[in-house]
Structure formats: structure tokens, C-alpha cells
Amino acid sequence: MKLKKSTKILVGAIILFGVIYAIQRLSFTTSTTENANPFAKLDTSKINRISITGAVGEREIIIARESRGWFIVSPIRFEADRSEINLLLSAIAGNPPASVVADNLSDSLAYGLGEDAPSLGISENIQNGISLRVGSVTPDFDGCYIELKGSTRILDLTKNIRTYVSQSLTNWRDRAIFEFRLEDIREAIFNLGDTTYHFTHVDTGWQMERVNIPAARIREVIGDFIGTMALSFVDTALSMEKSSMDYEFIIANGSRQSGKLMKESDQTYVSNSANDQTYVAGSLILDNLERGLREISRDFLKNGNSKR
């Protein structure tokens, strides 16, 4: 009887310990699930700093929100591409959940979290921010693996932010060569050799040498030019002495922007005095602009060209 009683006690104790362990395990799992929302404490409307570090040895890209918008502040100072910033912030705005896939960092390489994994830092202020490393894209391509700073766990994030943090500095730079619209221009002047094309914005129309020019033709030629996007950037000194065309825009607010276009080999370059930047543009942009100006002059001026 004593043996049976002790056996019952032992069995009861085992069951009790089993129940306690199950409850603790359930609590642990629930807690992990609840806390696996890395971006829960961030308000994307208040974020003012983004930092991205690529492989070891690469320069850190720091992007900050200023009164005039988002700017890259390191390793160069340049206006940031707002669409790229918005895409990144939109990706985390929904507070995408994450789940634990590994409890220690010995498995880092298997998830693309080796030394060459890019890092992402996002913050509202010094007190509220998040820092993480971003690994490989998940097999379904919808998410990616991340490792939060100070944590030993690897998480499966349900949103793919690897796409954004893998981008180069060039991709984060604003590729718009001009920030104004065609409607903002008061005068547009183009010098091609000894020929000058001088357009004036009068009310809702355009004129050249007091001859009315259809707005559609102006938009097709000048509008296409100022709406072009850069393919790349030239950050070193580039001689534009052999420029094929000079241009100047007088804006409605009284400011002026001028520059040069030059074609060399298969590259076309556009300089802009507004930021002393030289851009690499589409190879046909100069040819299209020159042809468009000549056609307007031919179609609307009696002598077929315009001179000062």
C-alpha cells in the first residue's frame, strides 16, 4: 500500500511539473509572439533619421528629415529620393510581425546574417529608435530575416525590407535634375552655337520673338527636358567647356538656374547651377532638345531660326 501511495505521489508530482512547464512554455511563446513586432514603438510620421550600413568597409549612409524634406547628410550632402524614403517607411508603417526562427546567432550564416549583412537604423529621437541587421529574403520573397541589436534571436519578418537596405548611395539620391515645373518658368533661354532660342511665358501661353507658340509644343520640348531624370551623378570635377548647349531658366519667384549640356562618347551630361551638380542623363536628351528647338523655330518663325 505504501508503495502504491508513493507511486501515486510521484506520478502526481510529474504531472504537476509537466503542467507547470507547459504553462511556462505557453507563456514564453505567447510573450515572444507579442514582442516580435520590431517596429511597434515607432511612429513613421515622426521618424527623422535613417542610417544604412552595407558590407564591412562600406560608408554609412545617413538620411535625415529637415525642414525642406529628406536629405542625405553623409557621406555626401544631397537631396534624398522621397519616393524611396516613402517606400521604406510604408514597409514598416503597418508594424509587420515577426517570428523567432533561431534562438542563437550561431545560425546567422544560414539566414544571410553574416558580417556582410546590411544594417538599418531608424529613429524618432535619441530615446526612441531601432537598430537591426537584415539578412536573406525568405523563400516566399515576401519577408526577410532580421536580427535586432542586443538580441540573440533571429526573426522572420513578414515584410521584405532587404530590397531597400541593399541599395547603393546612388539609388537614395534624388534623380530629378530640376525641382520646378514648366508652369513655374517665366523665361527659357537656350544657346546653341550662334543661335539663341528665347521663350517667354505670357499668361497661359508661350511666345518666341513675340510669336505665339502652342503650349503643347513647349511641353513636348522644354517640358520633357526639365522633367528628365538622371541616370547617375558626377561628383568629381568635369570640364563642361566643350558644351553643346547652354541653358538658363528664369523662375517665377525671381531665381535663375543655368547650366550646360555636353555629349561625350555615349554619355550626355547636364550641369545645374542650383546645386553645382553634374548629372548623367539619357544619351538622346541633347539630340531631342536640339531637334525640338529647331523644329519650333522652323514651324513658327519666318526666318526659321532665332538670334539675339
Image (cartoon, rainbow, N blue to C red):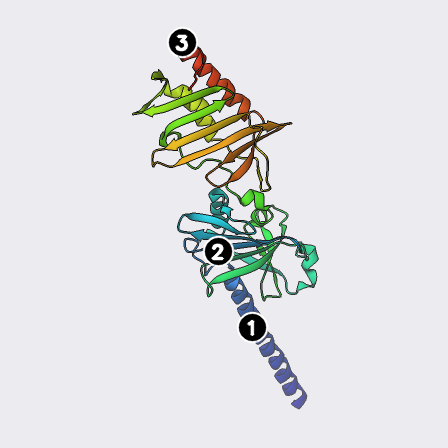
- Mark pair 2, 3: CA separation: 57 Å
Can you identify the residue that label 3 sits on? Answer: 302
Q: Which residue in the rendered view is the most extreme toward the top?
A: 302
Q: Which of marks 2 and 1 is nearer the N terminus?
A: 1
Q: Which of marks 2 and 3 is nearer the N terminus?
A: 2
Q: Determine whether 268 is above or below 141 in the image.
A: above
Q: Earlier in the sequence, mark 3 or mark 1?
A: 1
Tell me which amino acid carries mark 3.
Lys
Tell me which amino acid carries mark 1.
Gln
- Of the residues tagged 2 and 3, which is closer to the observer? 3
Tell me which amino acid carries mark 2.
Arg
- Of the residues tagged 3 and 1, which is closer to the observer? 3
**Category of crowding for the residue at label 1, using alpha-carbon neighbours closer than 10 angstroms: few (below 14), some (14–19), many (at least 20):** few
**Category of crowding for the residue at label 2, using alpha-carbon neighbours closer than 10 angstroms: few (below 14), some (14–19), many (at least 20):** many
Q: In this view, does 187 lie to the left or right of 289?
A: left
Q: Determine whether 137 is above or below 20 in the image.
A: above
Can you identify the residue that label 2 sits on? Answer: 49
Which element carries disc 2, helix, strand or loop?
strand
For the C terminus, the quadrant is top left
Give the mark count. Answer: 3
Coordinates of residue 79 in the picture (x, y in percent): 48, 45
Can you identify the residue that label 1 sits on? Answer: 24
**Near-viewer residue (159 or 283):** 283
Q: Is residue 99 left or right of residue 297?
A: right
Coordinates of residue 226 in the picture (x, y in percent): 46, 30
Instruction: Residue at 39% x, 20% y: name it.
Output: 216
For the N terminus, the quadrant is bottom right
